[in-house]
Image: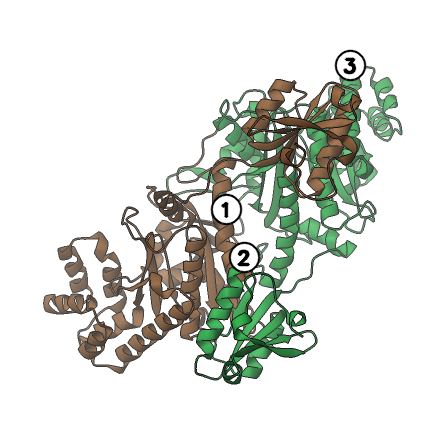
Chain colours: A green, B brown
Amino acid sequence: MYDRLKGFRDFYPDEMSARREVIDVLEETARRYGFREVGTPALERTQMYVDKSGEEIVEELYAFEDRGGRHVALTPELTPTVARMVVARQGELGLPVKWYSTRPFWRYEQVQQGRFREFYQANIDVIGSAEPEADAEILAYAADAMTGLGLSGDDFEFRVSHRDILGGLLESLEADVDTQAAIRAVDKRAKIDVDEYHDLLASAGLSIDQARQFDAVLGADDLEELVDFAGTDRVAEAVENLRAVLEAAEELGARQFCDVSLSTARGLDYYTGVVFECFDSTGEVSRSVFGGGRYDDLIESFGGQPTPAVGVAPGLAPLSLLCQRAGVWPEEEPTTDYYVLTVGGGDTRAVAARVARELRALGHVVEADLQDRGFGDQLSYADRINAETVIIVGEQDLADGAVTIKDMASGDQTQVPLDDFPPEEGRPTYEDYE
Amino acid sequence: MYDRLKGFRDFYPDEMSARREVIDVLEETARRYGFREVGTPALERTQMYVDKSGEEIVEELYAFEDRGGRHVALTPELTPTVARMVVARQGELGLPVKWYSTRPFWRYEQVQQGRFREFYQANIDVIGSAEPEADAEILAYAADAMTGLGLSGDDFEFRVSHRDILGGLLESLEADVDTQAAIRAVDKRAKIDVDEYHDLLASAGLSIDQARQFDAVLGADDLEELVDFAGTDRVAEAVENLRAVLEAAEELGARQFCDVSLSTARGLDYYTGVVFECFDSTGEVSRSVFGGGRYDDLIESFGGQPTPAVGVAPGLAPLSLLCQRAGVWPEEEPTTDYYVLTVGGGDTRAVAARVARELRALGHVVEADLQDRGFGDQLSYADRINAETVIIVGEQDLADGAVTIKDMASGDQTQVPLDDFPPEEGRPTYEDYE
């Protein structure tokens, strides 16, 4: 007997059917916005991640040398791959392009609740627009996907921030600040105590006083306070951009789910403008459910033309925690329209096969006996797969020129002339014949 | 600029939309038969493949040591994972179970036409039935999937063989034969010349005379000749099983696509009973398109209870070659129901956003301007995404209390009162208002 690798999961049909329902909502919502599916490789050159995130990242990757001596890694996220693909077809693509996909990613990290080494994410990106409408469309997409899952504004909130406000505020402190390090400190703020947070800000180059000032202004109620505090065009423009995004989100119906929260920073270094994270409003799911944001510099840094972009990446595992907490996780059980039950010999098998074929041709989910089992065992199996209707093809039925239609919920059944069954269209049940 | 790894592919939206249509047919057909989706990991312990196929297999794998010192491999196929999953829940599963999934697999091998290092396959398996009905259901599924793709009996054929007939014939030769090696020779027969084939049979333990005899009897027109030749119960029973499978396939409408072809053997060692390969009937696609068969011993060899199983695994790449040859590969272009075009200021953006939202809520694919572009550029974009209908929200339209509906095929357009648009249901086009 072989064991499954730690941090990897097998999804058996019941759980998978619920996951598939969730993925279908994420993808169908994306399609309605005109996002188009892309397919992407599971392996990329390790260098692509090292260049963006430093040599340390390799420790978190499934990285190895392939048989051709290439240093390769299982993709830990999609965004670098998207950037590579845009650069590879630069000029042909006709921007903007709007892409989505759902697939697994891999990171070698500590396994804990809702966090695995193999994890599934949808990625939804608008590439080639710097306008606030693009950021708003990503927020609106995310809000529609969440409400499509049955979640409401009581269940989730988007904490919206802006990298350029954070960067501009730090710049205005006139300290020799490592902006990325300071933003990473902000990103960790909720997870660490205040002393540790101030220590991180200090090692990013802020004095204790500056750290306190910075911290206080991040919590300001009014964005105008930030503009006044910084007194720079950069912050004024970033605040203006954030307002424009929120206004466009209002027009798309998504503003109601957004809270401005400048202490939300997103860990990844490549974000540039608006960033946001989705949280459980009740706090029961304590970590960020998913996040997104603008990454205007990444594609250029990959050797492409300057190409603004913005995206979001809902992960299945944290999303399932939220949906379960909110009581909207789909039922984990199979559904089956028909089970075609055969009893006795003669033509019963041939007729049952024809009935099953014709019902399948109508688009229904139909199972039939594959085990040469008796009546009772077949009925148990039909019950186990939650068959709504059982079509009984017995010797006596055929002698009567009929089949028996059994409703599995009530147990009621009736005979129907074989010539009339199945009809040429529709989804015949007991009720149509009682 | 980073390059893509050799043998790996990026699928941009046009090509991906065609691939998705094909995957949808493969999966929707499986669902109608009551197959249930499973989700499976990309990594497994390398030992699982070594135990089944010998140490040589590692040369064809993306195998490496992970950071925890585990010897792991990117999964080269699904069947061993399916066997592992069945063993892990032995007793709970309530057999038979019917599983499907579609995902990438990886093999480090020579890249050639229709063969890549990362390749996508659907896998469809019936686990827990030894009856001919299960083999027939797999054949019928495969035939329905192929005809669902628009292919006909002129395009493809299933060459059906039986491992136990081959094994039984070899046994009856009373030579000291390495059965697996001889079957591998049969599998290679079409790809090598007759001398090389006889050499392989010889090194499997057959004399030249025996090799010729074996070869001749494989080509027999009548299965009864095989029974007579061998004169053993084993071959008689295997022939009886093959006949029963073909009869059950007849009842399910799939017999017409099946040719008995005993020189079809499938390379993998774990097959036991009926095996088959799908070929292009015209021979233009020269290699097997996909294959399947019965593997009754695999689950037991993984430490489980004896559990018969049968499955098929259509691969996207060879299937696309066949569909392209037959002229049924889906159109590689985007489809869009509506583009909502904004001209001028005032409330145009807000109204356009509302119209887009309402059309999306009806389930339609709707794009709108994300670039603050002019009329002409927006119309070009709408054309590029193949928008069927453009809804123009201009200042003049709003002054008239209307929007303009433009049919992109004809260029015809007309104004519709804003209060009536969009209606509460349906898919409004120019024709509804002309």
Q: Position of residue B155 (x, y in %)?
A: 33, 51
Image quadrant where residue B312 sits: bottom left
Q: Number of labelled discs?
A: 3
Disc 3 to disc 1, C-alpha distance: 50 Å
Residue marked by disc 3:
A233
Q: Position of residue A404 (x, y in %)?
A: 58, 78
Residue A389 vertical placement versus B123 (above, below): below
Q: Please report the residue visible at 71 percent of the width from the left and 34 percent of the height from the top.
A: B356
Report if residue A153 is visible in the image: yes
Disc 2 to disc 1, C-alpha distance: 33 Å
Looking at marks 3 and 2 on the same chain, the residue that comes earlier in the sequence is marked by 2
The C terminus of chain A appears in which quarter of the rendering?
A: bottom right
- Secondary structure under badge 2? loop
Residue A354 vertical placement versus A153 (above, below): below
What kind of residue is marked 1? Glu
**Chain containing the residue with disc 1:** B
Dot 1: within a 10 Å radius of its alpha carbon, few (fewer than 14), some, or many (20 or more) residues? Answer: some
Horizontal side of residue A206 vs B67, given as left or right: right
Residue marked by disc 1:
B21
What kind of residue is marked 3? Asp
Residue marked by disc 2:
A5
**Chain containing the residue with disc 2:** A
